[in-house]
Image (cartoon, rainbow, N blue to C red):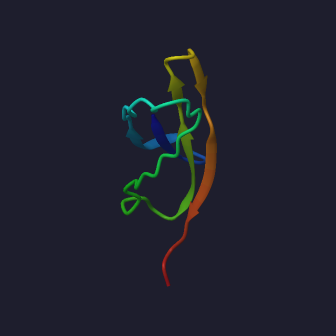
Amino acid sequence: EYQITQNGTGTGVLNYTEEASALQGSASQMTVKKWLPLNSLTPGSYTLHMKVVDRNRGQTVTPSATFTIIQPD
């Protein structure tokens, strides 16, 4: 699950959920490359929240990262 919130307001501006296919073999990591549509966001500070659920191990991780959208020149 991906959620982007606007900092200072806590308002959710984008929510997205997807199912990733199972890993093959004994791999214990996977890399997800995802394009998220940010063109509708106004300049300001935002936080990307992720929720990753490993259903095989019953584990959940919830990393986050902040980013800033600036006004183009």
Q: Position of residue 10 (x, y in %)?
A: 55, 40
Residue at the image point whose x is 59% and y is 19% from the top = 59
Say if 68 sits above or below 66 in the image: below
- Give the image location of residue 42, x and y in percent: 45, 62
Residue at x 45% of width, y 32% of height: 24
Left/right of residue 46 with respect to residue 12 in the rendered view = right
The location of residue 55, given as percent across then percent down, is 49, 18
Toward the viewer: 51 or 28?
28
Left or right position of 67 against 13: right
Quarter holding the N terminus is top left
Left or right of residue 44: residue 12: left
| Farthest front residue in view | 25
Residue under the point 51% across and 65% down: 43
Closer to us: 64 or 18: 18
* Residue 3 rendering spot, x and y as whole percentages: 47, 40
**As drawn, 1 above or below 40:** above
In the image, taking residue 22 as reference, residue 48 lies left or right, namely right
Vertically, is 29 above or below 71? above
Figure label count:
0
For the point 48% across and 46% down, which residue is it?
A: 32
